[in-house]
Image: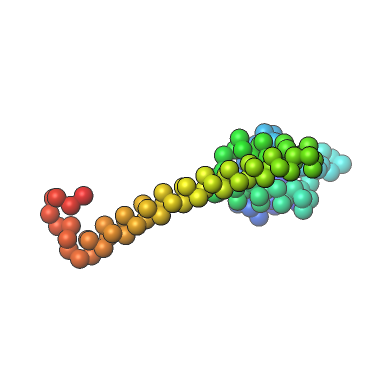
Amino acid sequence: MTIKEVSERFDLSADTLRYYERIGLIPRVPRNKSGVRDYDEESCQWVQLIKCMRKAGVQIEALIEYVALYRQGDDTVDARRDILAEQRNRLIERMEDMQAALERLNGKIERYDQGLMRSSSGQ
């Protein structure tokens, strides 16, 4: 697949895809005889993983480390697992914070719906 096709498929700009490859988030994308990027299924799977992880708030540095360890082979399985577990724990904390904020918002909206927020004393 061309970079344009991958860009459209994953809703990422071509510049973002090039950047991800340049900083090591995506292993080197195969090239055709003319030297143009020719994304294969494995490359697309990396793009999909990185997009998912970034959307979940996983830091670029953690992903770069994960990909670098992956390239080193099976001796790094434990280290890769540890990175994923740490990122999962951070995501759980963020989700808990977001859940608390959602509950507060829901409570405030409910107070508005009940007409309790008419005075200047209601935050």
Residue at far front of view: 78
| Front one among 8 and 57 | 57
Q: Is residue 28 above or below residue 49?
A: above
Q: Position of residue 7 (x, y in %)?
A: 65, 49
| Front one among 6 and 55 | 55
- Answer yes or no: is residue 44 visible: yes
* Colour style of the rendered protein structure: rainbow
Q: How many marks?
A: 0
The residue located at (75%, 39%) in the rendering is 76
In the displayed structure image, the side of residue 116 where residue 76 appears, left or right: right
The residue located at (70%, 48%) in the rendering is 46
In the displayed structure image, the side of residue 25 where residue 89 appears, left or right: left
Q: Is residue 100 above or below residue 33?
A: below
| Front one among 22 and 32 | 22
The residue located at (66%, 55%) in the rendering is 9
- Answer yes or no: is residue 21 visible: no
The image quadrant of residue 37 is top right
In the displayed structure image, the side of residue 4 where residue 116 appears, left or right: left
In the displayed structure image, the side of residue 71 where residue 100 appears, left or right: left
Q: Position of residue 74 (x, y in %)?
A: 79, 43
The residue located at (14%, 57%) in the rendering is 118
Q: Position of residue 28 (x, y in %)?
A: 76, 39
Residue at far left of view: 119
Residue at far bottom of view: 114
